[in-house]
Structure formats: structure tokens, C-alpha cells
Amino acid sequence: MTPTVPSHEPIFNVPKCVVGVLAVLVAVHLGRSLLSADDDFWFVLAMAFIPARYGELAAELPGGQLAMLTSPVTHMLVHGDWVHLALNSAWLLAFGGAVAERTGTLRFLLFFLLCGLAGAGAFYLANSDLLQPMIGASGAISGLMGATLRFLFPAIDSGGFRRLREAPRSVRLMTLGEALTDRRILLTSAILVIMNVLTIVGFGGAQNGAGIAWEAHLGGYVIGIFTYGLFDNVSASKDIPQPNND
């Protein structure tokens, strides 16, 4: 009789759509290295979200008036340097996997896009005349964090972090009402707000120094919590069996 070899789940099981987003971000950054300094500067400004672009300066800024339509999306593809890209990539892997497993590829990409747009919108509302460009996928990734919280704590309550890795679709999704009254989510949100507010006064690097677009973080996060239920593709009404924790 041939002995049965126990199978082991990989430590990281990242959905293809998350890997695809990560690959696009890396490819854009690598592609910039092929440009001259002047061309790279123009490219970044054309891709960046610049609030002042929506005033009288649209035609004068790189990208022209077309960038008024494209930059709310394209700003997510560009990062300041490899450190900026690495940090966002790490958070994308941390929060994107379970969300993608629950939503599927199309819903994941639409949700990611919505949170990124919300981040740009929040940045604009707080800085409508600002000429400083905003780049990076932090707003979209903050939305993934907000989404994850709505099933992270139910997972902890009924099996631990292992459920998120092995069977994220088996975890119950909090209703929006539950999420907005759960003390753990409220505490996490308060900590996130405090951390971002500290960037305003310069703790850890102010926005105009380190380029921390705290408004985009909070905008994406809030939209992530509020709208994720519209994208989640797991029925909250049926009793979903838990994985074997033996």
C-alpha cells in the first residue's frame, strides 16, 4: 500500500488578478527607466492626478485636457520610486488576495478602480487648486483594507487568520451596519485617521515633503468599507461551512 503524502497549502496563494495588477505596476516603473529624465518627468506629470488641472491650467500641463479624464485612473499606475512601489505592492498582496478570492477578477478590478477614483476625489476636494501631483495606488489599496475588515474580524471570531488564507469565501461578511458599529473596526479606523492626520503636522514626513496623500488614503478606505458589499460575491444569507482546522 502506497503511503499517502499529506498535501500542504502554499503560504502565499495570490489570485492571478492581483498578480496582474502588481505586474502592471512594476512594468510601468521599469518602463520609466528607459526614458530620459525630461521624458520621464513629462510622463509622470501626464499620468499624475493634479487638482489644478481642473481649472484654467488643463491645456498647459503635460497630458493636456485629455488627462482631465485619464489621470484619475492613470495616477494609480505611477510611483515615486522603488520604495514607494514596494510598500504599495506589499499592502496590495496583504489585502488584495482574500478580496479577489471573494469577488472574482472583474469585480475585484472594478472595486480597485472605484477606490482609486474615490482617493483621487478626496484629494481633489481637499486641494482643489493644488499644482502638486498625486501618484500611486495607495487610495485603491486603502479601499482593499477597508473591504478586508468587513470579513477579517468574523474570520478571527470563527477560526482565525487561517480561514482567510485557506478559505476566504467561507467567511461571513459583516453587514454595513455591523461594520459601522463594530468596536474593532472603529478602533482600526481611528488609528488610521490619526496616522494620516499626523502626516499633516509633519510626523514621519509631511505631504509636501514625503508626498503622503493622506486624503487619498482616507477617501479610498471609506469607500472601501461602504461599498464592498456591492462587490462581494459570497452569499451572506446561507450558512457557509467552515474549513477543517485539524
Image (spheres, grey):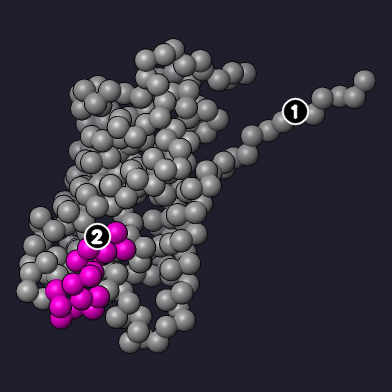
Q: Which mark is residue 6?
A: 1
Q: Is residue 72 magenta?
A: yes
* Quadrant in the rendering for residue 65: bottom left
* Quadrant in the rendering for residue 224: top left
What secondary structure is found at the residue carrying circle 2?
A: helix
**Identity, as a three-letter code, of the amino acid under mark 2:** Pro
41 vs 77: above or below: below
In the shown orientation, is residue 63 left or right of residue 24?
left
Percent x, y of residue 75: 29, 63
Q: CA distance from mark 2 to mark 1?
A: 48 Å
Residue sitting at the far front: 66
Q: Earlier in the sequence, mark 2 or mark 1?
A: 1
- The front one of 227 and 64 is 64
Residue sitting at the far top: 239
Residue at 47% over, 16% down:
240
Residue at label 2? Answer: 72
Percent x, y of residue 26: 47, 64
Region of the chain picked out in magenta, as a range? 58-74
